[in-house]
Amino acid sequence: MHFGVIGAGQMGAGIAQVAAQSGFTVTVQDVKDEFLARGQATIEKSLARLHEKGRLTETPADVLSRIRFTTDLQDFAGCDLVVEAVVENEAVKADLFRQLGQIVKPEGILASNTSSIPITSLATASGRPERFIGMHFMNPVPLMALVEVIRGYSTSDETARRVTDAARAMGKTPIECNDFPGFVSNRLLMPMLNEAIQCVMEGVAEPEAIDGIMKLGMNHPMGPLTLADFIGLDTCLSIMEVLHRGLGDDKYRPSPLLRKMVQAGLLGRKSGRGFYSY
Ligand code: CAA
Ligand code: NAD
C-alpha cells in the first residue's frame, strides 16, 4: 500500500506515523520544508516514546525509513489512498481535492480527516465522489483506537470497504456514520468544550476548577479546556462554525470568548498559550 498524507501538523504527522508503523510506504506533503521538519520531529519523539515502552516491533529508524517528506503534490500520483489533514477550512481543502483529483491515479481513494466539513461537498470538488470518504482519526493518533468513517452521498461500498480495511491494518477500530455536520464525534464533543469556554467567560469557575470537576467527577482523561487547548482553539472554532451554520440552531453558537482567543492568536498547545501556558 502506498499511503499519502497531506499536512504535517499534529494530525498529519500522527497518521503518517501509524501508517508507517503498519508497514505502508508513506508520502507526506506540506507547503514548507520547515513544517515537514516539525512533523518529522513529532513523529521521531512519539516513536522514541513507544520504543522505550516496548510498544514498537521495529526500531524507530526502520519505521521512519518508510516515510518520504515532500512539498510537491505530484508525488501522490501513484498513491492507493491519500488522507488530507490540513487546516479546517473548506475552501483550502476543496482546492486541494480539485488538484488531487487530477493527480492521483484514477483507482486511488481520496479521504479527508476533517473534523466537521461536509464530506459530500469535498467529494464533489475531487471529481471522484465514489472514491471519496471521511477517514477521521482521533488525537493523539498513535494512542487513540477510533477511526470515524464517514460516507459521503456517493461513496461506494468498495471505497468504504477498502478504507475500513486500511484502518484495521493500522491497528484502529473503524466505526461508520453518515455525512451530517460534525458527524457523531464532534457533534457531541464540541458543544461540551464550547460550553466549558462559556463557563469561563461567565465566571462560573476558574479553568482549573472546570477541568478538575469534569476529570474527577466524570472520569474524563482530560478536562474540557485542556482538551480544547490540545485540539487547537482555531480548530474548535472552525468546527463550531460548521455546526452552527450547518444545523442552523443557535445552541451551536461559538462562545465569544473562543472567538476572541483565536483572534488574539491564543490557539492552545500549538501556539504555546490557550487556557493554560505551555
Ligand atoms: N505518542 C506516543 N506515546 C504517547 C503520546 C504520543 N503522541 N502521547 C502520550 N503518550 C504516552 C505517554 O508516554 C504515556 O505512556 P505510559 O502510560 O506508558 O507512561 C501514555 O501515553 C499516557 O500519557 P500521559 O501519562 O502523558 O497522559 P495521559 O495518561 O493523560 O494520556 C491521553 C494521554 C491518552 C492523550 C489521554 O489524556 C486522553 O485520552 N485524552 C483525551 C484525548 C481525546 O479526547 N482525544 C480526542 C480529541 S477530539 C478529536 O481528536 C477529534 C477532532 O476532530 C477534534
Ligand atoms: P495543524 O494546524 O496542526 O496542522 C495543519 C497542517 O496543514 C500545517 O502543518 C499546515 O502547514 C498544513 N497545511 C495548511 N494548508 C496546506 C495546504 N494547502 N497544503 C498542504 N499542507 C497545508 O492542524 P491539525 O490539528 O493537524 O488538524 C488538521 C486537520 O485534522 C483539520 O481538518 C482538523 O479539523 C482535523 N482534526 C484535528 C484534530 C485535533 O485534535 N487537532 C483531531 C481530528 C481531526
Image (cartoon, rainbow, N blue to C red):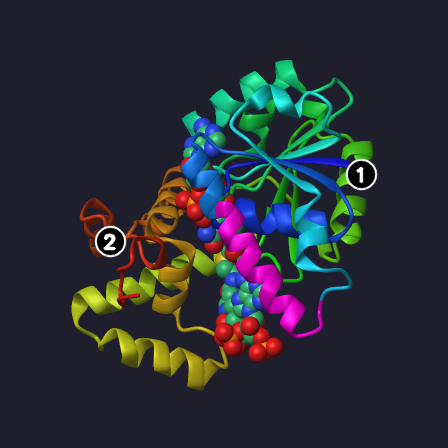
Are the residues at dot 1 and dot 2 in contact (C-beta closer than 8 Å)? no
| Residue 273 within the magenta-colored segment of the rendering | no
Does ligand 2 reach within 8 Å of label 2's beta carbon? no
Residue under the image location 63 percent in, 13 percent down: 102
- Point out the image quarter for the C terminus: bottom left
Magenta residues, as a range? 39-55
Image x and y of residue 59, in percent: 71, 60
Image x and y of residue 262, in percent: 25, 48
**Marks 1 and 2, how far apart in space?**
39 Å
In the depicted structure, whether residue 163 falls above or below residue 130 = below
List the single residue furthest toward the bottom: 216
- Point out the image quarter for the N terminus: top right
- Residue located beneath label 1 in the image: 162
Q: Nearer the viewer, residue 70 or 232?
A: 70
Q: Residues within 10 Å of mark 2 (few under 14, many from 20)?
A: many
Q: Using the image, tell me which numbered label, if any, was put on residue 266.
A: 2
**Marker count (numbered):** 2
Image x and y of residue 106, in percent: 75, 17
In the depicted structure, whether residue 170 falls above or below residue 26 = below
**Is residue 125 visible to us here?**
no
Residue under the image location 32 percent in, 63 percent down: 195
Q: Using the image, tell me which numbered label, if any, was put on residue 131.
A: none
Compared across the picture, whether 257 is left or right of 59 comes to left
In the depicted structure, whether residue 4 falls above or below residue 60 = above
Mark before the other along the chain sequence, 1 or 2: 1
The image quarter containing residue 222 is bottom left
Q: Amino acid at mark 2?
A: Leu
The image quarter containing residue 87 is top left
